[in-house]
Image: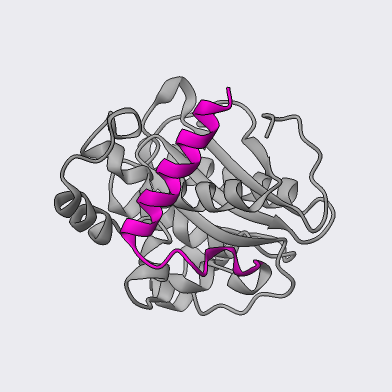
Amino acid sequence: MSIRPVPFLVGEYYHLYNRGNDKRIIFLDGYDFKRFMLLLYICNSTDPFHMSSFFNRGLASVEIFSVKRTDILVGIGAYCSMPNHFHILVHEKTEGGISVFMQKLSTAYSMYFNKRYGRSGSLFEGKFKAKHIDNEPYFNWVFSYIHLNPVKLINPAWKEEGIQDVEKTKKYINEYKYSSYHDYFIDERPEKVILNKEEFPEHFSKLRDFEDLCREFTTYSEDNKSNT
């Protein structure tokens, strides 16, 4: 579970994440979040990426999500975008797939963001970070952690102190649009095509709702705390 550099091996699973340079906000509004989600889909392809091919033609989001791709670079199992960072759970499908995908994604979003807000320079805090997922309990914890990440927006100390108001928090997570939680636990939407569920084993079969995610996160966290 060491932070990069880690070798990306075909057939293995990884937790990828990065944040804004100097912890800056990188998603200022819903349009920014939506653009990043569109890029998660478009950039996950062996096809060359040209932003003008998609965004200068006035295509609606649902049309972009219906664009046919050739081979995908990685399998995406979960994701969450937060105001100043993001998390992605991926499967290394082909050699070099993660590196190419993340380069395309980071470059495309940085170009969009800098153009929209009239800025220049690096948007992200160096290279993306990665942790290798090497066992099922950790796999389920990462899946839970990614989907529970927005809790910190209404309760910054939730990881240390736990979730105090379960119903309020569950309602907030259910309504948070910028993660794959909706596609697993609510209903289908056009954004579901970002995910490549077939690339992932049945690790998530026992995680059926918000309460299961909370239990999985807490149990794994407490077990690892006691072993350190």
> Could you say where residue 90 lies in the image, as x and y percent from the top left?
64, 54
222 relative to 75, above or below: above
The structure residue drawn at horizontal position 67% and vertical position 44%, both measured from the top left corner, is 103
- The structure residue drawn at horizontal position 42% and vertical position 69%, both measured from the top left corner, is 184
Above or below: residue 201 compared with residue 145 = below
Q: Is residue 66 above or below residue 72?
A: below
Q: Is residue 55 above or below residue 134?
A: below
Evaluate whether residue 58 shows in this view.
no
Q: Which residues are magenta?
A: 200-228
Q: Residue at x 77, y 35 (%)?
A: 6
Give the quarter of the image for residue 26: top left
**Residue 53 on the magenta segment:** no
Looking at the rendering, in which quadrant would you find the C terminus? top right
Report whether 98 appears left or right of 138: right
Q: Residue at x 50, y 31 (%)?
A: 123
Q: Quadrant of the N terminus?
A: top right
Q: Nearer the viewer, residue 88 or 2?
A: 2
Picture coordinates of residue 59 (x, y %)?
42, 73
| Quadrant of res 183 | bottom left
Q: Is residue 110 among the parts visible in the rendering? A: yes
Residue 220: within the magenta?
yes
Left or right of 4? Residue 144 is left
| Viewer-side residue, 171 vs 96 | 171
Query: What secondary structure do most residues of the magenta stretch adopt?
Result: helix
Residue 9: give x, y in percent of width and height.
82, 49
